[in-house]
Amino acid sequence: MLPYFIDSHCHLDFSKFNRDREEVIHRAKEAGACEMINSGIDLKTNISTLELAKTHDCIHPTIGLSPMLATNPDKDRPQEVLSQLDEQAGQAIGIGEAGVDYYHCTDEKLRKRQRDIFEQVISIAEKHTKPLVIHGRDAEEEALAMAGHLDRVIFHCYGGSLETMKKITDAGHYISIPTLVCFSSHHKEIAATVPEELMLIETDSPYLSPRKGRNEPAYLIDSINTIAEKRNMEPADVAEITRKNTYTAFKI
């Protein structure tokens, strides 16, 4: 049995878990996932994330604003979420996920809108001295330039370049390795080279499963074994190191 480990980013409040949420949480604990960080992305999921954390001691909430909201035709929606983040920050252990996504958003006007809204999220994280969980797909360098001055930043589901990763970790910020590491050669490179004191692990459940179908926190064992192999470490050490790093990053 591995030492306890933490899933630093999941979405157990999403509808894909409606059928068996309690069983998924039980399986996570049985596998060794003693705690999970559940991340909101909009008005509805920020509420459900906070509610889930109130009923489960093993779950810690972060509340966020998906960059895809910024490109939504309903322009008032992001402002509602920004107000929610500011009002509810005290109930969360972090702000995010939030950021910029150039993979899904290719229009420069919409990218600028993403950046403008992300700047406001950064200000909220700074005001409340909360760590910021960044979604920065294909925009990692830009996200670092915008948020790198904060005390604690976590690059969720990191898939950027090794060069940008070095800039992030040189600034003292965290890289969260998703379960993609089990089958992606690029993520294996990331896992092999990230400084161990700045390495977190996550499932991003229900997405990015290393097995067939839906992902869940129990499957982090697969990541732990893969990372251990790439780093020539014991799986127990990967579990313990990433758990302690998560405590430090989020001040749990």
Image (cartoon, rainbow, N blue to C red):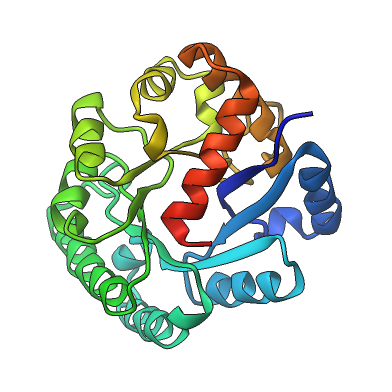
- Total marks in image: 0
Residue at left offset 40%, top offset 36%: 197
- Quadrant assignment for the N terminus: top right
Residue at left offset 27%, top offset 79%: 127
| Residue in front for this viewpoint, 85 or 221 | 221
In the rendered image of this protein, does residue 187 appear above or below residue 144? above
Judge left or right: residue 79 versus residue 167: right
The answer to whether residue 13 shows anywhere in this view is: no
Question: Which image quadrant is residue 111 in?
Answer: bottom left
| Residue in front for this viewpoint, 108 or 234 | 234
| Residue in front for this viewpoint, 139 or 56 | 56
Judge left or right: residue 92 versus residue 72: right
- Residue 180 image point, x, y percent: 51, 28
Residue at left offset 20%, top offset 38%: 170
Residue at left offset 34%, top offset 21%: 193
Question: Which image quadrant is residue 49 in?
Answer: bottom right
- Residue 183 image point, x, y percent: 53, 18
- Residue 122 image point, x, y percent: 25, 68
- Residue 96 image point, x, y percent: 41, 63
